[in-house]
Amino acid sequence: MSLWSATDAARATGGRATRAWQADGVSIDTRTIRPGDLFVALTAARDGHDFVPRALERGAAAALVSRVPDGVASDAPLLVVADVQAALEDLGRAARARMTGRVLAITGSVGKTTAKEMARVAFGAQMDVHAAEASYNNHWGVPLTLARCAPDADLAVIEIGMSNPGEIAPLARIVQPHAAIVTTVGPAHLAAFGSLEAIAREKAAIFVGLTANGTAILNADLAVTPILREAARGRTALTFGESAEADLRILDVQLHDDTTVVRASERGQAILFRIGGVGRHLAMNAAAVIAASGPLGADPDVTAQALSGWSPPAGRGTRERIVLDPVEDRALDLIDDAFNANPASMAAALDRLAAARPGAGGRRVAVLGDMLELGADEIALHAALAQHPAMEAIDTVHAAGPRIRAAFDALPATRRGEWRPEAEELAAEIRHLVHPGDVVMVKGSKSARTARVVDAIRDLGHREREPALKDT
Protein backbone atom coordinates (compact mmCIF):
# COMPACT_ATOMS: atom_id res chain seq x y z
CA MET A 1 0.00 0.00 0.00
CA SER A 2 1.42 3.41 -0.99
CA LEU A 3 1.73 6.26 1.46
CA TRP A 4 0.25 8.89 -0.89
CA SER A 5 -1.55 8.63 -4.20
CA ALA A 6 -1.88 11.57 -6.57
CA THR A 7 -5.60 11.67 -5.81
CA ASP A 8 -5.15 11.66 -2.01
CA ALA A 9 -2.38 14.26 -2.07
CA ALA A 10 -4.35 16.53 -4.41
CA ARG A 11 -7.41 16.25 -2.18
CA ALA A 12 -5.34 17.07 0.93
CA THR A 13 -3.59 20.10 -0.59
CA GLY A 14 -6.12 21.43 -3.06
CA GLY A 15 -3.47 20.99 -5.72
CA ARG A 16 -3.51 19.64 -9.28
CA ALA A 17 -1.85 16.37 -10.17
CA THR A 18 -0.47 16.31 -13.72
CA ARG A 19 -0.95 12.55 -13.86
CA ALA A 20 -1.53 9.55 -11.63
CA TRP A 21 1.31 8.47 -9.32
CA GLN A 22 1.90 6.57 -6.08
CA ALA A 23 4.47 7.64 -3.46
CA ASP A 24 5.95 5.42 -0.74
CA GLY A 25 7.67 8.23 1.16
CA VAL A 26 8.18 12.00 1.36
CA SER A 27 11.52 13.79 0.92
CA ILE A 28 12.83 17.35 0.88
CA ASP A 29 16.46 16.48 0.02
CA THR A 30 17.71 15.00 -3.24
CA ARG A 31 20.86 13.79 -1.47
CA THR A 32 18.86 11.30 0.57
CA ILE A 33 15.81 10.79 -1.63
CA ARG A 34 14.75 7.21 -2.30
CA PRO A 35 12.98 5.82 -5.36
CA GLY A 36 9.25 6.18 -4.86
CA ASP A 37 9.42 9.30 -2.67
CA LEU A 38 7.33 12.42 -3.19
CA PHE A 39 9.86 15.26 -3.46
CA VAL A 40 8.72 18.48 -1.77
CA ALA A 41 10.31 21.53 -3.42
CA LEU A 42 10.59 23.80 -0.39
CA THR A 43 12.12 27.24 -0.76
CA ALA A 44 14.62 28.00 2.01
CA ALA A 45 18.30 28.82 1.57
CA ARG A 46 17.84 27.52 -1.99
CA ASP A 47 14.78 27.01 -4.14
CA GLY A 48 13.79 23.35 -4.16
CA HIS A 49 12.33 23.74 -7.64
CA ASP A 50 15.89 23.83 -8.96
CA PHE A 51 16.35 20.26 -7.74
CA VAL A 52 13.17 18.74 -9.16
CA PRO A 53 14.89 17.37 -12.31
CA ARG A 54 17.49 15.66 -10.14
CA ALA A 55 14.82 14.25 -7.82
CA LEU A 56 12.93 12.75 -10.76
CA GLU A 57 16.15 11.35 -12.23
CA ARG A 58 16.78 9.62 -8.92
CA GLY A 59 13.43 7.90 -8.97
CA ALA A 60 11.07 10.30 -7.21
CA ALA A 61 7.46 9.24 -7.74
CA ALA A 62 6.43 12.88 -8.12
CA ALA A 63 7.31 16.41 -7.05
CA LEU A 64 5.25 18.86 -5.00
CA VAL A 65 5.76 22.26 -6.68
CA SER A 66 4.20 25.70 -7.04
CA ARG A 67 5.31 25.99 -10.68
CA VAL A 68 6.60 23.69 -13.38
CA PRO A 69 10.41 23.91 -13.07
CA ASP A 70 12.71 24.47 -16.03
CA GLY A 71 14.05 21.26 -17.51
CA VAL A 72 11.07 19.16 -16.45
CA ALA A 73 9.15 17.26 -19.11
CA SER A 74 5.56 18.28 -19.81
CA ASP A 75 4.33 14.83 -18.76
CA ALA A 76 6.39 14.67 -15.54
CA PRO A 77 4.52 13.52 -12.39
CA LEU A 78 3.85 16.72 -10.44
CA LEU A 79 1.47 18.02 -7.82
CA VAL A 80 1.09 21.73 -8.48
CA VAL A 81 -0.06 23.88 -5.55
CA ALA A 82 -0.24 27.57 -4.71
CA ASP A 83 2.35 27.38 -1.91
CA VAL A 84 4.64 24.42 -1.21
CA GLN A 85 5.09 25.07 2.52
CA ALA A 86 1.34 25.42 3.04
CA ALA A 87 0.76 22.26 1.01
CA LEU A 88 3.26 20.34 3.15
CA GLU A 89 1.35 21.48 6.23
CA ASP A 90 -1.87 20.29 4.58
CA LEU A 91 -0.29 16.90 3.93
CA GLY A 92 0.67 16.75 7.61
CA ARG A 93 -2.91 17.57 8.67
CA ALA A 94 -4.32 14.96 6.33
CA ALA A 95 -1.86 12.35 7.56
CA ARG A 96 -2.83 13.13 11.15
CA ALA A 97 -6.54 12.94 10.35
CA ARG A 98 -6.25 9.46 8.84
CA MET A 99 -4.12 8.01 11.63
CA THR A 100 -5.71 5.21 13.64
CA GLY A 101 -3.02 5.20 16.36
CA ARG A 102 -1.97 7.73 18.97
CA VAL A 103 0.35 10.73 18.91
CA LEU A 104 2.92 11.95 21.44
CA ALA A 105 4.29 15.49 21.12
CA ILE A 106 7.44 16.60 22.94
CA THR A 107 8.96 20.02 23.53
CA GLY A 108 11.35 21.56 26.06
CA SER A 109 14.37 23.82 26.33
CA VAL A 110 16.55 20.74 26.76
CA GLY A 111 15.94 17.08 26.16
CA LYS A 112 13.21 17.04 23.50
CA THR A 113 15.29 15.13 20.96
CA THR A 114 16.59 12.80 23.66
CA ALA A 115 13.05 12.17 24.94
CA LYS A 116 11.87 11.56 21.37
CA GLU A 117 14.55 8.91 20.85
CA MET A 118 13.86 7.39 24.26
CA ALA A 119 10.19 7.18 23.33
CA ARG A 120 11.03 5.53 20.02
CA VAL A 121 12.99 2.81 21.82
CA ALA A 122 10.81 2.45 24.92
CA PHE A 123 7.46 2.30 23.12
CA GLY A 124 8.95 0.43 20.17
CA ALA A 125 9.25 -2.59 22.45
CA GLN A 126 5.45 -2.89 22.50
CA MET A 127 4.03 -1.10 19.44
CA ASP A 128 4.78 0.14 15.92
CA VAL A 129 6.36 3.58 16.41
CA HIS A 130 6.96 6.32 13.82
CA ALA A 131 9.41 9.14 14.64
CA ALA A 132 11.68 11.39 12.62
CA GLU A 133 15.25 10.19 12.24
CA ALA A 134 16.58 13.68 13.03
CA SER A 135 15.51 16.79 14.93
CA TYR A 136 12.75 17.70 12.51
CA ASN A 137 10.97 20.02 14.92
CA ASN A 138 10.31 23.26 13.03
CA HIS A 139 7.68 24.65 10.64
CA TRP A 140 8.58 22.17 7.90
CA GLY A 141 9.98 19.34 10.02
CA VAL A 142 6.78 18.73 12.00
CA PRO A 143 4.43 18.42 9.00
CA LEU A 144 7.07 16.41 7.12
CA THR A 145 7.25 13.91 9.99
CA LEU A 146 3.47 13.56 9.98
CA ALA A 147 3.31 13.28 6.19
CA ARG A 148 5.74 10.36 6.37
CA CYS A 149 3.63 8.47 8.93
CA ALA A 150 1.74 5.37 7.84
CA PRO A 151 -2.00 5.54 8.63
CA ASP A 152 -1.86 2.33 10.66
CA ALA A 153 1.12 3.23 12.88
CA ASP A 154 0.37 2.56 16.55
CA LEU A 155 2.20 5.67 17.70
CA ALA A 156 3.75 8.78 16.15
CA VAL A 157 6.30 10.68 18.24
CA ILE A 158 6.61 14.30 17.14
CA GLU A 159 9.23 16.75 18.41
CA ILE A 160 8.24 20.43 18.41
CA GLY A 161 10.81 23.18 18.79
CA MET A 162 10.90 26.96 18.63
CA SER A 163 13.32 29.86 18.41
CA ASN A 164 10.84 32.76 18.42
CA PRO A 165 7.47 33.52 20.07
CA GLY A 166 4.33 32.08 18.54
CA GLU A 167 5.87 29.05 16.82
CA ILE A 168 4.70 26.14 18.97
CA ALA A 169 0.91 26.57 19.06
CA PRO A 170 0.34 26.34 15.26
CA LEU A 171 2.46 23.19 15.08
CA ALA A 172 0.70 21.66 18.10
CA ARG A 173 -2.65 22.22 16.40
CA ILE A 174 -1.42 20.32 13.34
CA VAL A 175 -0.09 17.47 15.51
CA GLN A 176 -3.18 17.13 17.78
CA PRO A 177 -1.37 14.90 20.29
CA HIS A 178 -3.01 12.50 22.71
CA ALA A 179 -0.17 13.32 25.14
CA ALA A 180 2.21 16.28 25.19
CA ILE A 181 5.43 16.51 27.21
CA VAL A 182 7.34 19.60 28.33
CA THR A 183 10.71 18.17 29.40
CA THR A 184 12.01 21.34 31.07
CA VAL A 185 12.17 25.11 30.70
CA GLY A 186 15.54 26.87 30.70
CA PRO A 187 17.23 30.00 29.35
CA ALA A 188 17.60 28.76 25.76
CA HIS A 189 16.70 31.43 23.15
CA LEU A 190 16.47 33.91 26.00
CA ALA A 191 17.46 36.73 23.65
CA ALA A 192 14.23 36.23 21.69
CA PHE A 193 11.93 35.92 24.72
CA GLY A 194 13.36 38.19 27.40
CA SER A 195 12.44 36.04 30.40
CA LEU A 196 12.16 32.47 31.59
CA GLU A 197 8.46 33.01 32.18
CA ALA A 198 7.95 33.93 28.52
CA ILE A 199 9.80 30.80 27.43
CA ALA A 200 7.59 28.71 29.74
CA ARG A 201 4.42 30.17 28.23
CA GLU A 202 5.67 29.37 24.73
CA LYS A 203 6.59 25.80 25.68
CA ALA A 204 3.23 25.34 27.40
CA ALA A 205 1.50 26.31 24.15
CA ILE A 206 2.01 22.69 23.09
CA PHE A 207 -1.02 21.87 25.26
CA VAL A 208 -3.39 23.86 23.05
CA GLY A 209 -3.17 21.13 20.43
CA LEU A 210 -4.16 18.27 22.73
CA THR A 211 -7.10 16.11 21.71
CA ALA A 212 -10.28 16.44 23.77
CA ASN A 213 -9.15 13.73 26.19
CA GLY A 214 -5.45 14.47 25.84
CA THR A 215 -2.93 14.52 28.69
CA ALA A 216 -0.44 17.25 29.55
CA ILE A 217 2.82 15.89 31.02
CA LEU A 218 5.02 18.45 32.72
CA ASN A 219 8.08 18.87 34.88
CA ALA A 220 7.15 19.35 38.56
CA ASP A 221 10.52 20.71 39.69
CA LEU A 222 10.71 24.09 37.95
CA ALA A 223 10.26 27.63 39.20
CA VAL A 224 7.92 28.08 36.23
CA THR A 225 5.92 24.90 36.88
CA PRO A 226 2.89 27.00 37.92
CA ILE A 227 2.86 28.51 34.42
CA LEU A 228 2.83 25.04 32.89
CA ARG A 229 0.09 23.92 35.26
CA GLU A 230 -2.04 26.92 34.41
CA ALA A 231 -1.67 26.23 30.69
CA ALA A 232 -2.82 22.65 31.32
CA ARG A 233 -5.89 23.75 33.30
CA GLY A 234 -8.98 21.87 32.18
CA ARG A 235 -6.87 19.02 30.84
CA THR A 236 -5.74 15.81 32.45
CA ALA A 237 -2.25 16.59 33.73
CA LEU A 238 0.56 14.35 34.95
CA THR A 239 3.79 15.52 36.54
CA PHE A 240 7.26 14.02 36.80
CA GLY A 241 10.32 15.00 38.78
CA GLU A 242 11.93 14.82 42.19
CA SER A 243 9.28 16.91 43.95
CA ALA A 244 7.20 15.08 46.53
CA GLU A 245 3.99 15.97 44.71
CA ALA A 246 5.12 14.58 41.33
CA ASP A 247 2.88 11.83 39.96
CA LEU A 248 5.97 9.98 38.76
CA ARG A 249 8.55 10.79 41.41
CA ILE A 250 12.26 10.14 40.99
CA LEU A 251 13.55 8.91 44.33
CA ASP A 252 17.18 8.15 43.56
CA VAL A 253 19.57 8.51 40.62
CA GLN A 254 22.87 6.67 40.51
CA LEU A 255 25.34 7.76 37.83
CA HIS A 256 27.74 5.06 36.71
CA ASP A 257 30.48 5.17 34.11
CA ASP A 258 28.23 4.02 31.27
CA THR A 259 24.69 3.92 32.67
CA THR A 260 22.21 5.68 34.91
CA VAL A 261 20.16 3.64 37.37
CA VAL A 262 16.92 5.23 38.52
CA ARG A 263 14.59 4.36 41.37
CA ALA A 264 11.17 5.98 41.06
CA SER A 265 7.59 5.67 42.20
CA GLU A 266 4.38 6.21 40.26
CA ARG A 267 1.47 6.69 42.64
CA GLY A 268 3.02 4.30 45.14
CA GLN A 269 4.13 1.72 42.55
CA ALA A 270 7.91 1.19 42.67
CA ILE A 271 9.82 1.46 39.39
CA LEU A 272 13.49 0.56 38.97
CA PHE A 273 15.12 1.01 35.58
CA ARG A 274 18.41 1.62 33.82
CA ILE A 275 19.23 4.02 30.99
CA GLY A 276 21.98 3.41 28.44
CA GLY A 277 23.57 6.81 29.06
CA VAL A 278 24.84 8.94 31.93
CA GLY A 279 23.13 11.95 33.49
CA ARG A 280 20.48 13.10 35.96
CA HIS A 281 18.80 14.94 33.10
CA LEU A 282 18.40 11.60 31.31
CA ALA A 283 16.51 10.29 34.33
CA MET A 284 14.11 13.22 34.01
CA ASN A 285 13.57 12.63 30.29
CA ALA A 286 13.01 8.94 30.94
CA ALA A 287 10.49 9.71 33.68
CA ALA A 288 8.54 11.91 31.27
CA VAL A 289 8.41 9.10 28.72
CA ILE A 290 7.28 6.55 31.33
CA ALA A 291 4.59 8.97 32.53
CA ALA A 292 3.23 9.06 28.97
CA SER A 293 2.70 5.28 28.92
CA GLY A 294 -0.84 5.27 30.31
CA PRO A 295 -2.24 7.99 28.03
CA LEU A 296 -0.70 6.23 25.03
CA GLY A 297 -2.01 2.78 25.90
CA ALA A 298 1.41 1.34 26.75
CA ASP A 299 2.58 -0.73 29.71
CA PRO A 300 4.73 1.50 31.96
CA ASP A 301 6.81 -1.44 33.22
CA VAL A 302 7.71 -2.51 29.68
CA THR A 303 8.41 1.12 28.81
CA ALA A 304 10.76 1.52 31.77
CA GLN A 305 12.70 -1.68 31.18
CA ALA A 306 13.09 -1.00 27.44
CA LEU A 307 14.98 2.24 28.22
CA SER A 308 18.14 0.20 28.84
CA GLY A 309 18.25 -0.25 25.06
CA TRP A 310 18.56 3.49 24.43
CA SER A 311 21.91 5.26 24.10
CA PRO A 312 22.69 8.87 23.12
CA PRO A 313 23.49 9.60 19.47
CA ALA A 314 26.79 11.05 18.27
CA GLY A 315 27.38 14.60 19.45
CA ARG A 316 25.00 14.28 22.40
CA GLY A 317 27.15 12.81 25.13
CA THR A 318 28.39 9.67 23.43
CA ARG A 319 31.59 8.27 24.84
CA GLU A 320 34.24 6.73 22.65
CA ARG A 321 37.75 5.47 23.11
CA ILE A 322 40.57 7.18 21.21
CA VAL A 323 43.57 4.86 20.90
CA LEU A 324 46.67 7.03 20.88
CA ASP A 325 49.20 4.19 20.65
CA PRO A 326 47.88 0.67 20.05
CA VAL A 327 51.29 -0.89 20.72
CA GLU A 328 51.73 0.67 24.15
CA ASP A 329 47.97 0.56 24.84
CA ARG A 330 47.73 4.30 25.44
CA ALA A 331 44.30 5.84 25.01
CA LEU A 332 41.88 8.49 26.22
CA ASP A 333 38.09 8.64 26.32
CA LEU A 334 36.14 11.34 24.47
CA ILE A 335 32.65 12.48 25.47
CA ASP A 336 31.30 14.23 22.39
CA ASP A 337 28.58 16.67 23.50
CA ALA A 338 29.35 19.38 20.99
CA PHE A 339 25.95 19.43 19.27
CA ASN A 340 24.62 22.47 21.15
CA ALA A 341 24.64 24.16 24.54
CA ASN A 342 22.62 26.25 26.97
CA PRO A 343 22.98 26.55 30.76
CA ALA A 344 20.84 23.49 31.52
CA SER A 345 22.51 21.20 28.99
CA MET A 346 25.95 22.50 29.96
CA ALA A 347 25.26 21.63 33.60
CA ALA A 348 24.10 18.17 32.55
CA ALA A 349 27.30 17.67 30.54
CA LEU A 350 29.43 18.66 33.52
CA ASP A 351 27.51 16.15 35.66
CA ARG A 352 28.19 13.52 33.00
CA LEU A 353 31.92 14.22 33.10
CA ALA A 354 32.02 14.25 36.90
CA ALA A 355 30.52 10.74 36.95
CA ALA A 356 33.05 9.35 34.46
CA ARG A 357 36.04 7.31 35.63
CA PRO A 358 39.37 8.28 34.04
CA GLY A 359 41.97 5.69 33.16
CA ALA A 360 45.18 5.13 35.07
CA GLY A 361 46.85 8.46 35.71
CA GLY A 362 44.15 10.28 33.79
CA ARG A 363 42.06 13.35 34.53
CA ARG A 364 38.56 14.64 33.93
CA VAL A 365 39.02 17.38 31.34
CA ALA A 366 36.31 19.75 30.08
CA VAL A 367 36.68 21.71 26.84
CA LEU A 368 33.96 24.36 26.82
CA GLY A 369 32.74 26.81 24.19
CA ASP A 370 30.34 29.73 24.19
CA MET A 371 26.61 29.35 24.78
CA LEU A 372 24.71 31.59 22.37
CA GLU A 373 21.32 33.38 22.27
CA LEU A 374 21.23 34.01 26.03
CA GLY A 375 20.40 37.71 25.88
CA ALA A 376 21.52 40.46 28.23
CA ASP A 377 22.48 38.07 31.06
CA GLU A 378 24.77 35.92 28.93
CA ILE A 379 27.98 36.77 30.81
CA ALA A 380 26.42 36.06 34.22
CA LEU A 381 24.97 32.78 32.94
CA HIS A 382 28.39 31.74 31.68
CA ALA A 383 30.12 32.77 34.91
CA ALA A 384 27.62 30.71 36.93
CA LEU A 385 28.98 27.52 35.37
CA ALA A 386 32.09 27.86 37.52
CA GLN A 387 29.93 27.37 40.62
CA HIS A 388 28.20 24.22 39.37
CA PRO A 389 28.83 21.44 41.93
CA ALA A 390 30.21 19.05 39.30
CA MET A 391 33.17 21.40 38.76
CA GLU A 392 34.62 20.10 42.03
CA ALA A 393 35.24 16.73 40.37
CA ILE A 394 36.73 18.16 37.16
CA ASP A 395 40.50 18.48 37.08
CA THR A 396 41.09 20.82 34.14
CA VAL A 397 38.95 23.16 32.06
CA HIS A 398 40.01 24.47 28.67
CA ALA A 399 37.80 27.09 27.05
CA ALA A 400 37.33 28.88 23.74
CA GLY A 401 35.26 31.99 23.09
CA PRO A 402 34.69 35.44 24.60
CA ARG A 403 31.58 34.49 26.59
CA ILE A 404 32.86 31.31 28.21
CA ARG A 405 35.86 33.25 29.47
CA ALA A 406 33.61 34.49 32.29
CA ALA A 407 33.36 30.91 33.57
CA PHE A 408 37.02 30.21 32.93
CA ASP A 409 38.18 33.27 34.88
CA ALA A 410 35.85 32.41 37.80
CA LEU A 411 37.49 29.00 38.29
CA PRO A 412 40.34 28.42 40.74
CA ALA A 413 43.74 28.77 39.07
CA THR A 414 44.44 25.09 39.75
CA ARG A 415 41.50 24.11 37.56
CA ARG A 416 42.13 26.48 34.67
CA GLY A 417 43.85 25.03 31.64
CA GLU A 418 44.02 27.16 28.48
CA TRP A 419 41.64 29.77 27.09
CA ARG A 420 41.64 30.84 23.45
CA PRO A 421 39.40 33.25 21.52
CA GLU A 422 38.40 30.60 18.96
CA ALA A 423 37.77 26.86 19.13
CA GLU A 424 40.07 26.32 16.15
CA GLU A 425 42.98 27.58 18.24
CA LEU A 426 42.32 25.00 20.96
CA ALA A 427 41.91 22.34 18.30
CA ALA A 428 45.36 23.18 16.92
CA GLU A 429 46.90 22.72 20.37
CA ILE A 430 44.89 19.71 21.51
CA ARG A 431 47.80 17.27 21.42
CA HIS A 432 49.37 19.20 24.29
CA LEU A 433 46.16 19.68 26.28
CA VAL A 434 45.00 16.07 26.74
CA HIS A 435 46.88 13.03 28.01
CA PRO A 436 46.55 9.24 27.98
CA GLY A 437 44.00 8.10 30.57
CA ASP A 438 42.00 11.34 30.39
CA VAL A 439 38.25 11.52 29.98
CA VAL A 440 37.67 14.61 27.82
CA MET A 441 34.23 16.20 27.46
CA VAL A 442 33.65 18.79 24.72
CA LYS A 443 30.59 21.06 24.92
CA GLY A 444 29.48 24.31 23.31
CA SER A 445 26.89 25.86 21.03
CA LYS A 446 27.05 24.68 17.44
CA SER A 447 28.03 28.13 16.18
CA ALA A 448 30.93 28.18 18.64
CA ARG A 449 32.49 25.39 16.50
CA THR A 450 33.59 23.25 19.44
CA ALA A 451 33.06 20.28 17.14
CA ARG A 452 36.43 21.25 15.65
CA VAL A 453 38.00 20.21 18.95
CA VAL A 454 36.16 16.88 18.78
CA ASP A 455 37.55 16.31 15.29
CA ALA A 456 41.07 17.18 16.45
CA ILE A 457 40.87 14.71 19.35
CA ARG A 458 39.66 11.97 17.02
CA ASP A 459 42.53 12.73 14.69
CA LEU A 460 44.98 11.93 17.49
CA GLY A 461 44.57 8.21 17.07
CA HIS A 462 42.50 5.16 16.24
CA ARG A 463 38.88 5.53 17.33
CA GLU A 464 36.91 2.65 18.84
CA ARG A 465 33.22 3.29 19.46
CA GLU A 466 31.81 1.68 22.60
CA PRO A 467 29.43 -1.19 21.83
CA ALA A 468 25.74 -0.61 22.39
CA LEU A 469 24.80 -1.19 26.01
CA LYS A 470 22.75 -4.28 26.72
CA ASP A 471 20.63 -5.18 29.72
CA THR A 472 22.45 -7.81 31.77
Image (spheres, rainbow, N blue to C red):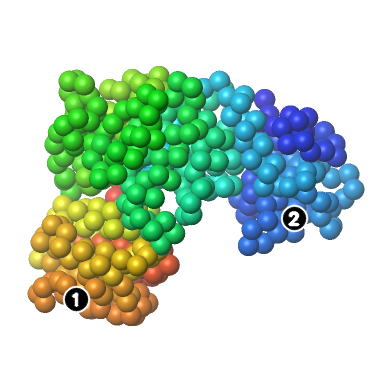
Q: Nearer the viewer, residue 189 or 130?
A: 189
Left or right of 117? Residue 245 is left
Q: Nearer the viewer, residue 400 or 267?
A: 267
Query: Residue at point 68% right, 56% down?
Result: 43
Residue 115 placement (x, y as % from top left): 36, 40
Residue 69 placement (x, y as % from top left): 81, 55
**Is the N terminus in the top left, top right, bottom left or bottom right quadrant?**
top right
Q: Nearer the viewer, residue 195 or 452?
A: 195
Q: CA distance from mark 2 to mark 1?
A: 51 Å
Query: Residue at point 54% right, 35% down?
Result: 173
Query: Residue at point 43% right, 46% down?
Result: 202
Q: In this view of the protein, can residue 120 be seen by the observer? A: no
Left or right of 438? Residue 370 is right
Give the crowd class for mark 2: few <14, some 14-19, many >=20 residues within 10 Å.
many
Which residue is under mark 1?
A: 409
Query: Residue at point 26% right, 33% down?
Result: 240
Q: In this view of the protein, can residue 449 be seen by the observer? A: yes
